[in-house]
Amino acid sequence: MNEDEKYMYRCLQLAQNGQQNAKPNPMVGAVIVAQGRIIGEGYHVRCGQGHAEVNAFASVSVEDEKLLGEATMYVSLEPCSHHGKTPPCADLIIKKGVKRVVVGCVDEFAEVQGRGIRKLRDAGIEVTVGVLEDECKALNRRFFTFHRLQRPYIILKWAQTANGFMDDHGQALAISSPFTQMLSHKLRAEEDAILVGRVTEEREHPQLTVRQWVGPNPKRLVIDHQHPLNLESLHAHNIQSLIVEGGRKTLDAFLAQGLWDEIRVETNLGLTVTGGTRVPHLPANVDVVSSNSYGENVIVVYRIRK
């Protein structure tokens, strides 16, 4: 790991602190380094408040301000160049006179898209782009998907027995363990909305709330033929992420249309049934991004192959 990667990892660590309150803005972390040490750092805490760069500069001590002229600023996402709820961060960086800026990834938001980087370079600041780019893009994959595709980042989620069934002859089945159920509630707290189909709603009456974790409940959605999913409406309401926890037909409908970005499958290796609803077929274009065991339960996360 080189120096740039080391400090960019710190940016990513900081950025994750804004997971709940930065929405609908992206999570961003910033670190200022001079003479081989960190003299300032910050992250985007809350939408409408100071961005990561602003908070990083604010954390620099009076004694260390004289080092800014030789400092490098690391930021996980391209500094903004437009006036929004806060002034442009690119202008602040230029005003502070840092020598070099290292950017994790370009901001795909229409009002940025390379303009911040260009403004910094035009001001004579050395700019390096693409350090830990994949990791920085993955951190804000919901934000990028929302702006690029004009729809939420869609997570398909189901639990299955060891022999591939979602229920026991059509009857609801407790597949998750208490611990993995808690993890499901944690996921709900992190995403904007959750969806099931009419059959699941009528058969199981799921609460779809955060009961075993701390955080906001996701917006609850139920679809059927009379109430189809309207992605444009979700986009208009700033819903950047959607969990689909429906039954086989609902999940198959999303898979058939290619409306998914991530699939989370929980398997109870100690549970089998003699019949029931078979789980959906995984698409061919998937990569495993994580696999974790919790007792007899295994959760595997898939994403679309690049």
Image (spheres, grey):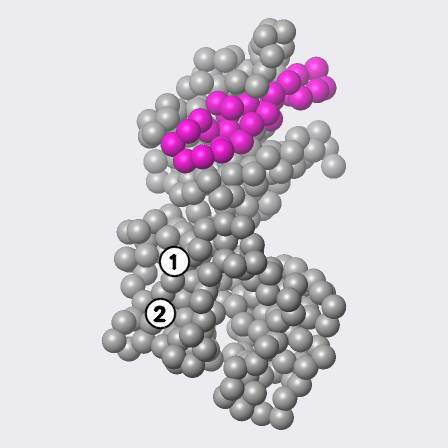
Question: Magenta residues, as a range?
Answer: 31-56
Q: Amino acid at mark 1?
A: Lys
When the figure is inspected, residue 283 is found, relative to residue 219, above or below; the finding is below
Which residue has dot 1 on it?
A: 219
Residue at the (58%, 92%) spot, across then down: 275
Residue at the (56%, 58%) spot, across then down: 212
Asked whether residue 151 appears in the rendered view, the answer is yes
SS category of the residue bearing label 2: strand
Locate residue 157, reporting x and y percent.
52, 68
Locate residue 209, reporting x and y percent.
46, 61
268 or 305: nearer the viewer:
268
Asked whether residue 303 appears in the rendered view, the answer is no
Seen from this angle, which residue lies furthest left? 226
Residue count near mark 2 (Cα–Cα under 10 Å), binned few <14, some 14–19, many ≥20:
some
Q: Amino acid at mark 2?
A: Val
Q: Tell me the number on the disc at residue 259.
A: none
Quadrant of the frame with the N terminus: top right
Seen from this angle, which residue lies furthest front? 211
Locate residue 266, reporting x and y percent.
61, 70
Which residue has dot 2 on it?
A: 222
When the figure is inspected, residue 257 is found, relative to residue 10, above or below; the finding is below
- 49 in the magenta segment: yes
* Image side of residue 105 versus residue 164, left or right: left
